[in-house]
Image (tube, helix red, strand yellow):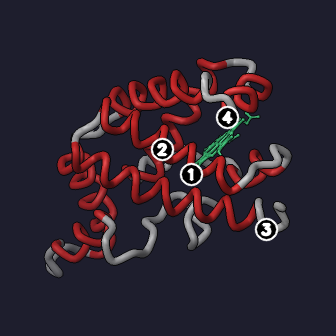
Amino acid sequence: MMHANGNPNTPPEGEQSLFRKILDGTSNAVDPSDRRAVLARQLRTQTDLDDAALDRLVRRFYSLARVDPDLGPIFNAQVADWEAHFARMVDFWASVSLLAGRYHRNALEAHRALRLRPEYFERWLGLFDQALQEEVSPPAREHLLTIARRIAANLSSRLCANAP
Ligand code: HEM
């Protein structure tokens, strides 16, 4: 799971999403089987994102998150191999934001044992936005933040339902 529709490799629904804007602007003359390729290319063009930018973003995010008083201890206790984690997160972001199709794991299950609280997701989003502002273009920031908010809400509702 990652999007509300349950598949990390298909675009999420949503009026405001860049996915929707590009698809709405794609000519009906484009063969349906080519639409995914057109979308993937347009996402890269319109955001200026690529693996190198996502790698910088991921590293900046964790440099902030690892010293956060609440989130830092969780990450530092769980992640043994940071380079492997960064590579996995670049695959994840490339897949959910650029349709790279390189992330095939279950992110929900990875968080289940962490006893996350709803306010941790707010903090996570704040730090992610700080990293976005520092590392990526304004359209990329908007695109990634829209996706991150949706996933955070999804994780929070599934993982924190019984939180006090
Ligand atoms: C409440 C804040 C969060 C905390 C404290 C947190 C913590 C963690 C930790 C400790 C791991 C490593 C698990 C492991 O390797 O054993 C992890 C993995 C991961 N996190 Fe989060 N996370 C949070 C929110 C999010 C959000 C909002 C997203 C997405 C927008 C996300 C996406 C991921 C992904 C994709 C992985 C890799 C899972 C895997 O494939 O094993 N996390 N997270």
Instruction: Specify whether tag 4 is near ligand 1 (CB below 8 Å).
Output: yes
Marks 1/2: CA distance? 6 Å
Give the label on residue 122, or none: 1
Asked whether the residues under the numbered discs 3 and 2 touch, taking CB atoms below 8 Å apart as contact, a structural biologist would say no
User: Mark 2 belongs to which amino acid?
Assistant: Gly
Marks 4/2: CA distance? 12 Å
Q: Residue drawn 57% across and 73% down?
A: 5
Asked whether the residues under the numbered discs 1 and 2 touch, taking CB atoms below 8 Å apart as contact, a structural biologist would say yes
Q: Residue drawn 82% across and 61% down?
A: 163
Which quarter of the rendered image does ligand 1 occupy?
A: top right
User: Mark 3 belongs to which amino acid?
Assistant: Ala
In this rendering, would 112 be left or right of 125?
right
Mark 2 = which residue? 126
Q: Is residue 114 above or below residue 146?
A: above
Q: Position of residue 143 (x, y in %)?
A: 33, 54
Alpha-carbon neighbours of circle 4 within 10 Å: few (<14), some, or many (≥20)?
some
Look at the image and tell me in which quarter the C terminus lies: bottom right
User: Mark 4 belongs to which amino acid?
Assistant: Leu
Alpha-carbon neighbours of circle 1 within 10 Å: few (<14), some, or many (≥20)?
some
